[in-house]
Amino acid sequence: MGKKKKKPAANVIGQNKQARRLYEFMDTFEAGIALQGSEVKSLREGRVSFKDGYVRFRDGEAWLVGVHIAPYENTSLFDRPDPERPRRLLLHKREIDMLQSRADQKGLTVIPVKMYFSRGKVKLQIALGKGKNVHSKKEDLKQRDIARDTARQLAAYK
């Protein structure tokens, strides 16, 4: 009897928790990200912050801007990259063109959702999102409260 190969699990490094609250997602994509070696070591420790991260398009390339990857502690002071530096996203040309055209036409934003390891490589899930207004944020909170109350009442019946 042969052993079955297990599919390697995607190890989540960090998530943008504000993204779901502030944006309504239309589409999601997976992108690679160009990093330096010490940044990858820092990511293995989970030291990433999405705070004000977004994707900018320049010269036919996609760039991740505003994501903070803390410097790896065991790197010399001279070799440390800037934690806030723009990082190039690795996408196919047609994906970049499609994302850029949709973001320009419809007033949508491309935002980073989560960063994870997939087969030893760092991947970034990005989403094409439309900003929520105050009314829709309140509506989401109301729906979540109703769902929670319903779940409590159903649990009380059991």
Image: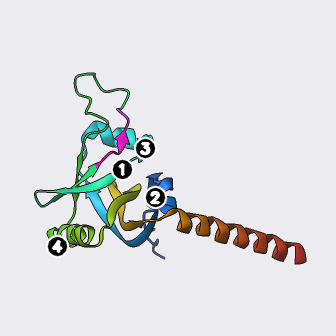
Distance, label 3 to label 1, CA atoms, is 9 Å
Tell me what residue is drawn at x 10 percent, y 57 percent: 59
The amino acid type found where label 3 is placed reads Ser
Few, some or many residues within 10 Å of mark 3 (<14, 14–19, 20+): some
For residue 120, side relative to residue 9 (left or right): left
Nearest to N terminus: mark 1 or mark 4: 1
In the rendered image, which residue does mark 2 sit on? 19
Q: Secondary structure at mark 4?
A: helix
The amino acid type found where label 2 is placed reads Ala
Nearest to N terminus: mark 2 or mark 4: 2
Closer to us: mark 2 or mark 4? 2
Q: Secondary structure at mark 3?
A: strand
Nearest to N terminus: mark 1 or mark 2: 2
* Image quadrant occupied by the C terminus: bottom right
- Residue 120 quadrant: bottom left
The amino acid type found where label 1 is placed reads Gly
Distance, label 1 to label 2, CA atoms, is 10 Å
Along the viewing direction, whichever of 97 and 69 lies nearer the viewer: 97
In the rendered image, which residue does mark 1 sit on? 53
Residue 158 visible to the viewer = no
Distance, label 1 to label 4, CA atoms, is 23 Å
Along the viewing direction, whichever of 9 and 126 lies nearer the viewer: 126
Q: Which residues are magenta?
A: 65-71
The amino acid type found where label 4 is placed reads Arg
Q: Is residue 68 in the magenta section?
A: yes
Along the viewing direction, whichever of 35 and 85 lies nearer the viewer: 85
In the rendered image, which residue does mark 3 sit on? 49
Few, some or many residues within 10 Å of mark 1 (<14, 14–19, 20+): many
Q: Secondary structure at mark 1?
A: loop
In the rendered image, which residue does mark 4 sit on? 94
Distance, label 3 to label 2, CA atoms, is 12 Å
